[in-house]
Image: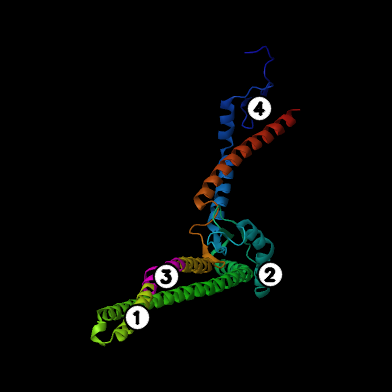
Amino acid sequence: MSDQPPRPVAQRSDGTDWSTYTDDEISLLDLWAVLIRRRVWLFGVTVVVLLAAVAYALSRVPVYEYRALVEIASQADGTTPIEKPSAVAARFNDIYIPQATSAWSEAHPEDPAPKVKANAAGDADLVRLSGEGTEARADAYTALMKDAVARLTKVHASVTERLRNRLRQQQSRAQRRLTTARNSVDELQARQKMLDEQAARLTREIEMQQQALGDLEAVRPGEIADSQDAVSAVRRLLDNEIIFKRQRLDDLRTTLNTDLPRRRDDLDGRLDTARDDVASREEEVALLAEQLAAITGTRLAAPPRRSDSPQGPSSAVIVVLGAILGLMLGVFAAFGVEFVSRANAHMRET
């Protein structure tokens, strides 16, 4: 192959020749021969590591994730939280969880405190509390998470109560304005009723005046007295009374047909305005009631619960990884032993 000097020959431990290379060429057959010859180390290390992986997989205590979701109190629109989820998560991590952890440790000095952290739950106005622990520590994680949420809820309750009080004051003022508007409508309707009654009285009075005027016009002065002076006097009286009746009748008709319709139109316009004001005030009161009902407090949207499956790799994955690692370490061990053996043989020759 190449113009290199002959390879020196060394004796194997079994007395046979073993060729050693002085160059960098490696034969796959030689590697395979090493693995076959050192198969005890190969399989021994593999089995030991595999057994260790199996023992670990069987003996390890499953660790589960404990999670709770916290819904932040909302403002009057029912959608905007009173505090950003990222800010609430920071307050949890910096204030409430440490306080709850300290309180739990004081109550359980012999047990390690659960480790819980908070983070914003995506785009939703929620904060997620999470931690990892064994199944036996479910009560500890539940108690700590509820304690931390209770501390936040107490702080947010004062904020939402101020919002409610402000809306209640606005609602009270709006209710008073609504009462005033309704009283105005009632007053205008009463005045409208008075106009109707006045129109009815005027109609009756006009009828009476017309009847009286007709009676006066039907009177014959000659039938009252025979003297000419008496007839003239009666005629003047009748004429004056007829003029008065006609004037009165004209005034009544003017009031009925002109003044009352004008006043009625004015009342109708004012009544429409008052009714519109009532409708507007009712909408305002209803809107404030909806806003008051839309304010929600901070609460546990999803109570603490354990995950259905343990965290981390399964036992089967651990065994497979153990087998792969054992095989790799077995190969390294086989070549390592072979290297040490050949190094010792080389040292003995020299």
Q: Are marks 3 and 2 in contact (CB under 8 Å)?
A: no
* Nearer to us: label 4 or label 1: 1
Residue under the image location 61 percent in, 31 percent down: 14
**Mark 3 crowdedness (10 Å alpha carbons): few <14, some 14-19, many ≥20:** few
Whichever of labels 3 and 2 marks the residue nearer the N terminus, that label is 2
User: Between residues 77 and 23, which one lies in front from this camera angle?
Assistant: 77
**Comparing labels 2 and 1, the label whose residue is closer to the camera:** 1
Q: Which residues are magenta?
A: 251-270
Query: Mark 4 highlights which residue?
Result: 11
Q: Which mark is residue 102?
A: 2
Category of crowding for the residue at label 4, using alpha-carbon neighbours closer than 10 angstroms: few (below 14), some (14–19), many (at least 20) = few
Amino acid type at mark 3:
Asp
Residue toward you, 324 or 199:
199
Gap between marks 4 and 1 measured at Cα: 174 Å
Q: Is residue 39 above or below residue 48?
A: above
Which of the 4 quarters of the picture holds residue 115? bottom right
Q: Is residue 264 magenta?
A: yes
Cα gap from disc 3 to disc 2, whole angstroms = 85 Å
Query: Where is residue 37 shown, x and y percent of the image?
Result: 58, 34
Which of disc 4 and disc 2 is earlier in sequence?
4
